[in-house]
Amino acid sequence: MINRRWLPLNALRAFDAVGQHLSFTAGAQALHVSQSALSRHVIGLEDLLGKPLFERRPQKLVLTEAGAALLPVVRKSFDRLEQALNTIRDSNRNVRTLRIHMPPSLLHQMGLPLLRAFRREFPDILIDVSSSHVTGLPAQDLDMAVVYDRQNVDDKVSDLLWSVRVTPVCSPELAKRHEGKSLEQFLTDNELLHVKLESEPRGMLWASYMRQSGVVSDTDRGLAFDTALSAVSYAISGEGVALADVELFAAELADGRLVAPFASTLADGYGYYLKFHPEDLADPVVALFRTWIINRFSDPAKTQPINPAS
């Protein structure tokens, strides 16, 4: 059995470097060692485990199943060691950096005021924020991520912050021009604004909504945007109908910049989840932020979206 007395730290560091770059040459350059030395360390680790960690294809390396399982654990462990050593070395500043990811629309609408509030309460915790258009977990190393996704089972701790409920929204002027029409006629007569989801057809969200509502209309027409914020902003400008989360865009609906011509809302199967690695429950900063943000989302008054008019 491998135990901590015999952990091959140099070999693990070599594997981490090669795994990050999927290249022995780039890994050797990152560690400032020779490629042959790096290769020997990785081969030694593979011999120890009795399994290959990389599939050596022409022109590129690919992680094997064993390599893909080991790499995030190694990277996270080195990250934690680095953070702890730097905290001890810099004992005059008790600073911890928390790396958080949020989808762009959520970050703008709710995330920014939430992060400001957290920083006011806990100024000694620095925050690095990243944002991307992915559905589900992003690829980069993070402490925590708020993700937009369907409910699924994986090896992460997953806390549901809220379930998305959607309704067609548009500008007040457009709604007035089509007043009195049925939902089906209203959607048929207007341009649909889509939000692109990774690996999904452009009209998937509208198709799901229309199916639940008993509406028949072409869902492939219209404009497609990377973010819900862009789609809703285009609708506010006066053209098109977006399918919007009524919680995420509550401020725009409340102040009349955006209207929902039809009162009903539908669950689209998606939600916003807080996700992180189970081993990070022992990290007091991760545990603190988790408790804090869950409490915030349990009180709607504390998660009001940004209102530029206020």
Image (spheres, rainbow, N blue to C red):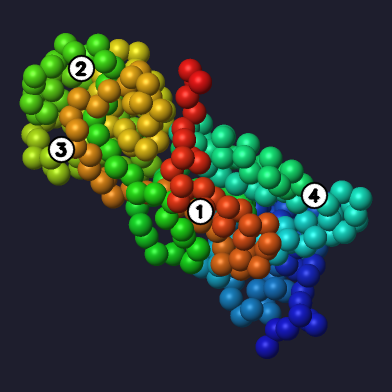
Q: Which mark is residue 294?
A: 1
Any part of residue 52 in sight? yes
Nearer-N-terminus badge (4/3): 4
Residue at x 37%, y 32% (from the top left corner): 250
Any part of residue 131 in sight? no
- Label 3: element kind: helix
Q: Nearer the viewer, residue 162 or 226?
A: 162
Residue type pointed to by label 1 = Ile
Q: Is residue 64 left or right of residue 246?
A: right
C-alpha distance separating marks 2 and 1: 36 Å
Depth check, mark 4 against mark 3: the one in front is 4
C-alpha distance separating marks 3 and 2: 19 Å
Q: Which residue is mark 2?
A: 175
Nearer-N-terminus badge (1/4): 4
Q: Is residue 27 left or right of residue 90?
A: left
Nearer-N-terminus badge (3/2): 2
Q: Nearer the viewer, residue 81 or 235?
A: 235
Q: Position of residue 43 (x, y in %)?
A: 70, 70
C-alpha distance separating marks 2 and 4: 51 Å
Q: Position of residue 2 (x, y in %)?
A: 70, 84
Q: Quadrant of residue 228?
A: top left
C-alpha distance separating marks 1 and 3: 32 Å
Depth check, mark 1 against mark 3: the one in front is 1
Contact? badges 2 and 4 (CB < 8 Å):
no
Residue at x 9%, y 35% (from the top left corner): 215
Residue type pointed to by label 3 = Met
Question: Which residue lies most toward the bottom here?
Answer: 1
Q: Which residue is mark 3?
A: 210
Q: Which residue is mark 4?
A: 95
